[in-house]
Image (tube, rainbow, N blue to C red):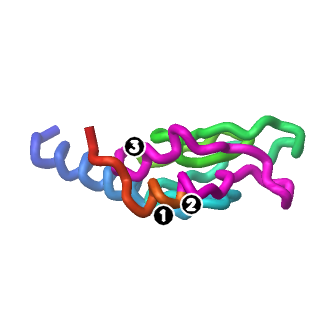
């Protein structure tokens, strides 16, 4: 296979993988391009909520796959609380600290 054909295929695959959807079940949501789609049927509501996805910016009770890039605001979720919300869904617990961090994220390392 020629190098240009290999590069063209890689570019197509990258473009196809980069089409994301907003995260499900989140209270404070990361940017739309960090979302994942659950990979299995919904677990029972007693499953533990946990950060998941490539950059751990999705709060879910099941593993999800997301694109793998990093934005400065993703660091805000390292200290955020991922737990079951009042509606029974997993989500990031809204807090003044999380809102402030998302509004003014730390510089990328």
Judge depth for marks 2 and 1 and give the one in front. 2
Residue contact at pointers 2 and 1, CB within 8 angstroms: yes
The residue that label 1 is drawn on is 32
Measure the C-alpha gap from mark 2 to mark 1. 8 Å
Q: Quadrant of the C terminus?
A: top left
Residue 75 figure quarter = top left
Give the x, y percent position of residue 1.
Answer: 17, 38
Give the x, y percent position of residue 6.
Answer: 19, 43
Residue 28 figure quarter = bottom right
The residue that label 3 is drawn on is 68
Measure the C-alpha gap from mark 3 to mark 2. 17 Å
Residue name at image x 46 percent, y 61 percent: 31
Judge depth for marks 3 and 2 and give the one in front. 2
For residue 6, side relative to residue 15 (left or right)? left
- Element type at marker 3? loop
- Element type at marker 1? helix
Measure the C-alpha gap from mark 3 to mark 1. 13 Å
> Between 45 and 66, which is closer to the camera in this rendering?
45
User: Which mark sits nearer the N-terminus, 3 or 2?
Assistant: 2
- Element type at marker 2? loop
> Between 79 and 71, which is closer to the camera in this rendering?
79
> Between 50 and 8, which is closer to the camera in this rendering?
50
Give the x, y percent position of residue 4.
Answer: 10, 47
Give the x, y percent position of residue 107.
Answer: 28, 47
Q: Residues within 10 Å of mark 2 (few under 14, many from 20)?
A: many
Q: Which residues are magenta?
A: 69-98
Residue 45 figure quarter = top right
The residue that label 2 is drawn on is 29
Residue name at image x 45 percent, y 58 percent: 102
Where is 82 relative to 21, above or below?
above
Q: Is 42 part of what is drawn in magenta?
A: no
């Amino acid at each position: 296979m020629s190098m240009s054909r290999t590069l063209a295929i890689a570019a197509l695959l990258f473009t196809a993988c980069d089409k994301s959807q907003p995260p499900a079940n989140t209270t404070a949501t990361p940017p739309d391009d960090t979302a994942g789609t659950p990979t299995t049927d919904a677990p029972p509501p007693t499953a533990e909520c946990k950060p998941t996805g490539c950059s751990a910016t999705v709060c879910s009770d099941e593993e999800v796959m997301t694109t793998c890039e990093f934005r400065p605001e993703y660091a805000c979720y390292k200290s955020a609380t991922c737990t079951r919300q009042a509606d029974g869904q997993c989500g990031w617990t809204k807090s003044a600290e999380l809102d402030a961090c998302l509004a003014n994220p730390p510089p990328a390392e």
